[in-house]
Every structure is written in C-alpha cells, then in structure tokens.
Image (spheres, helix red, strand yellow):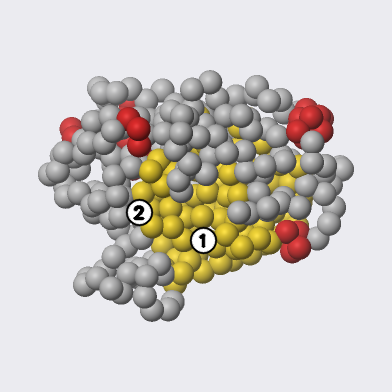
Amino acid sequence: MKHSTLKLTMLAALGFTATQANALGLVALPDTGFASSAYTNCYNDGRVEPPTTADEAKGNFGSYPIAGANQPSSSKNNTCFVTKPVDITVSPVSGYTLVAYRSNTIPKTTGGTGSIGTLLDLVWRDDATSSMCIFGTQIASMTNADHDSTKSGTQYFEVNDIARGGFADSGTVNVGYTIFSTTGNTSPVYRVGRTYTSVQHRSLKYDTLANKAVNGTNYLDLPTKNSVTAAITGENSSIDATDTASTTLATQDAVVNSNWVDFTADTVYFDDDGSTNAYSGFTYIEAACDSTNPEDWVENGAIRLRQTAQEETTFKEIAIPGYAPPGATIP
C-alpha cells in the first residue's frame, strides 16, 4: 500500500488518471507538483491580471467581492469544483460510504481558553475494494470571538489556507471542493498545492474596488517552487487599507512536499477588507487507504489552519488532530 505505482493503479481502476484535469470535479495533484509550481489553480483558473470585469478578478484571493453570478457552479468558474452532494455526509464521488466523522472546535491561538469556530473532518471509503478513501474538511463556521487576548479589541482569525498532512506515500491524489451554503458567505478554493508552505497573497490595496482587483507588487497567483519550506511565507506584518502591498519574488515560493496538500481560501468571521466568509468550501482529497478502523488513523497536527497576514494580521497557525491515510507520519 505504500508504493506510488500501486496508488496510480488504484486511481486508474476507479476512473482517474494522473493527468486528469476536469473542469468540473476532482483534479489530479501529483506528488511531484507541476512544471513551475507546487500549486494549481482552482477558482483562479482563467483569472486575468489586471482584470477588466468582476468575473476576471476571480475574487483576487478574497480581497475582491464575488458577485452571485460569478460564484463557482456546475456551468462556470468550476475548476476543482464538485457538484454539491445532497448533504455534507454524502461522498462527492459515487461508490463511497462515510466511515468516520469528527467535529473539532478551533482553539484560540493566543491566551485564554475557548474556541473561535468549528472544523469538520470526514472520511469516505470505496465500497468495492476498501482501498481508496476521500478525506473531507470544512470550516463549518468561524464565530464572533477574539482569538488573541493579548491585544485590545476583537482579533478575528483569518483562515487563508487549510493544509492536510500524511500523503507522502499516496502518489498522485485527486482534490476538489464544493460549496453548500447558498447565502454567499462561503469562500471558494482559489488554488491547491502539493506543499507544506502556505504563500501569502495581497491585493495592491484594499481601500477601493479597483485596488482590490489587482495584485500587490511581486505577488503571484501561482508561486514558484524553488527553495521555501516554511509553514508560511510572505511579509509578516499587518497593512492598513491604504498601504501599498509589496513583497519580493523570493517570498512567493513553495517547494513541493508530497506529504501535504494545501488549499488556499479566505475564511473569517469578519474580514478587514469588508467581506464576510465565515464558512470554507468543503475540501476533498482522494487517496489510497485500507480496511482498518479510521479512528486509528487520527494524527496530531494532521490539519493546519494558516493565517498568512493578508491584511491587518500576522502569521499564525492552528494545528488540529485529524484523519490521515493509515500509516501516515506527521512531522
């Protein structure tokens, strides 16, 4: 079960290939990444810089509002997007049955006790062979709660990336997401990478729509994959709405790490840029597993929620126990 060739054989048996890239549905995420990046576009696919329409802006990683007509759907903006199952407990792929479910409170990052939200963690296993699983994750809500008691006022934790670990022996995995809420308060997945590193993205400014629509200086939609191995990379300082965002190309980088899958989104109870996306998209990772009890697969730190300082925040990470493929190691 720990050979990449076997994983690819299993994926092919279920109708997937390492080069599959459907407009609608799960897409392949190789353990070697892509030609120039560990990441691939999801909702960002087709983004134009600078954009001439709201649809071309693709939300600019959450900085620019996404109108109802521009939401991901079965007919548009749907790279990596999966048709919504009848409810969250149903697999996005037919022939899978729910075998494990965890609801985790999201703890505060600094000071005090209590939670700032809820994270769902699910596993579905294929009915035919019990050799493939789908690992699902959703921030079910971010609440009106202060995550840092060392500062005055209410500090809302902003989840810019959801990273899941334990896939080093999985070969190519298939990934995607869907959106269950219809009220416009859910973040899409902008990109997904085979990497441990969450890469900061900032708009030029976040004071006007025109500035929110374009990237800050040197910010890339798809990072390079040269040298950065840190959990978070970018400028670790907050910026005001009228500050011009600028970085170096060296920070816009994330090396391939086959053990991790990173989904870039923008989920927060109330955002400094004025948006409110208290829910994340429901993310999915299809990878090989076995018929053992998934409750034995729970690993500390298998899920990482990253705040990458998109606006008036700094770098922070919350590590949460989660399901990982059997035999996985989380460093």
Report whether 270 appears left or right of 71: left
Q: Nearer the viewer, residue 317 or 248?
A: 248
Q: In this view, does 45 lie above or below 122?
A: above
Q: Residue at 33% across / 39% down in the picture?
A: 201
Please name the residue that numbered disc 2 is placed on. 315
Residue 122 is situated, as x and y percent measured from the top left of the image, at 65, 56
- Secondary structure under badge 2? strand
Give the residue type that dot 1 points to. Answer: Ala
Q: Residue at 66% across / 60% down in the picture?
A: 299
Q: Residue at 43% across / 57% down in the picture?
A: 317
- Secondary structure under badge 1? strand
Residue 5 is situated, as x and y percent measured from the top left of the image, at 79, 30
Q: In this view, does 192 lie above or below 182?
A: above
Q: Residue at 79% across / 41% down in the picture?
A: 2
Please name the residue that numbered disc 1 is placed on. 319
Farthest residue in the right direction?
A: 129
Quarter holding the C terminus is: bottom right
Mark 1 Cα shell of 10 Å, populated few (<14), some (14-19), many (≥20): some
Residue 279 at least partly seen: no
Quarter holding the N terminus is: top right
Residue 197 at least partly seen: yes
- Residue 110 in which image quadrant: bottom left
Disc 1 to disc 2, C-alpha distance: 13 Å
